[in-house]
Image: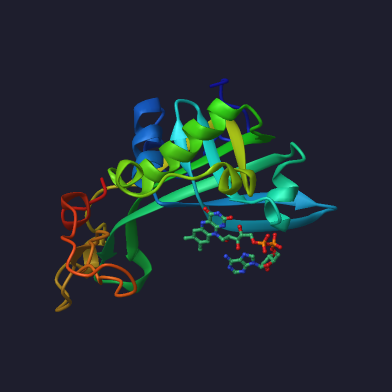
Amino acid sequence: MKAKTSRTQGSRYYPKRYDTNPESRDAILDEGLVCHVSFNIENQPFIIPTGYCRIENTLYLHGSVGSHFFMQMAKGIPVCVSVTLIDGLVLARSVFHHSMNYRSVIAFGKTREVTDSSERWLAAERFSEHILPGRWEDARQPDPGEMKKTMFIAIDIEEASVKFRAHGVIDDEEDLERNVWAGVLPLKLVPQVPETDEAGKTGLPIPEYIRHYSRG
Ligand SMILES: Cc1cc2nc3c(=O)[nH]c(=O)nc-3n(C[C@H](O)[C@H](O)[C@H](O)COP(=O)(O)OP(=O)(O)OC[C@H]3O[C@@H](n4cnc5c(N)ncnc54)[C@H](O)[C@@H]3O)c2cc1C
């Protein structure tokens, strides 16, 4: 990762909320499920939410070769990618001091269409494992025809910033005695009961890796 430039330099507000540890960046990227990719076409900014995975310093996206978005990505263009995890609602006694606990990454890089077949296969496997560890070995893996219909895009991270908020309420002194409940409502992505598809064989057990799915 290159040194920080003005692209990733936080403003004067809350410098303590920036985390320069590369492990923090990777932990957020590995916990997230969806990233938002922003890019410009002829001075028009676009942003697209999409799945991704990280392999070392590179983010991988995959999608249909016929997708307009992926056709843009294949051109080798500068992008800005963000991943945000919400950890809680911070409920102060005053509306003004309400906030959220969060961890987020903003990364910059240039897109590259992946053409090497082993890198494409690795990206496919790691993408699947990023979303649901255990699924790659269990489900049927992509055949050559399916791989041909799929485009893989790599984004080598040039630089990134990590920002977070991870503490309680900060209220004005004069509001502390108000009769208003204050505190943090922690939030977490928690799976609900799996819903079995009825189209095929029935009675198959729900795999452990699905029953015990969790993130972070
Ligand atoms: C959680 C999540 C995960 C996804 N994962 C993948 C993935 O792994 N691979 C993949 O190919 N796609 C994924 N998508 C779909 C992705 O957001 C795009 O819709 C798709 O990649 C590109 O479609 P397109 O080429 O038709 O869009 P474009 O033709 O490039 O988009 C044109 C316009 O369509 C609208 N549009 C496109 N996508 C969306 C959207 N999601 N929501 C609202 N408006 C939209 C926007 O106005 C956009 O400017 C995911 C979406 C979500 C929400």
Please say if 187 is above or below 150. Answer: below
Residue 210 figure quarter:
bottom left
Query: Residue at point 24% right, 50% down?
Result: 167
Residue 3 visible, this orientation: yes
Name the quarter where the C terminus is drawn. top left
Percent across and percent down for residue 28 are: 37, 41
Query: Residue at point 19% right, 62% down?
Result: 204
Please say if 104 is above or below 58. Answer: below
In the image, farthest residue toward the front: 201
Residue 110 figure quarter:
top right
Q: Specify whether 203 is left or right of 2.
A: left
Q: Nearer the viewer, residue 139 or 72?
A: 139
Percent across and percent down for residue 39 are: 70, 49
Percent across and percent down for residue 107 are: 55, 38
Q: Nearer the viewer, residue 25 or 141?
A: 141
Please say if 109 is above or below 38. Answer: above
Query: Residue at point 82% right, 53% down?
Result: 43
In the image, farthest residue toward the right: 42
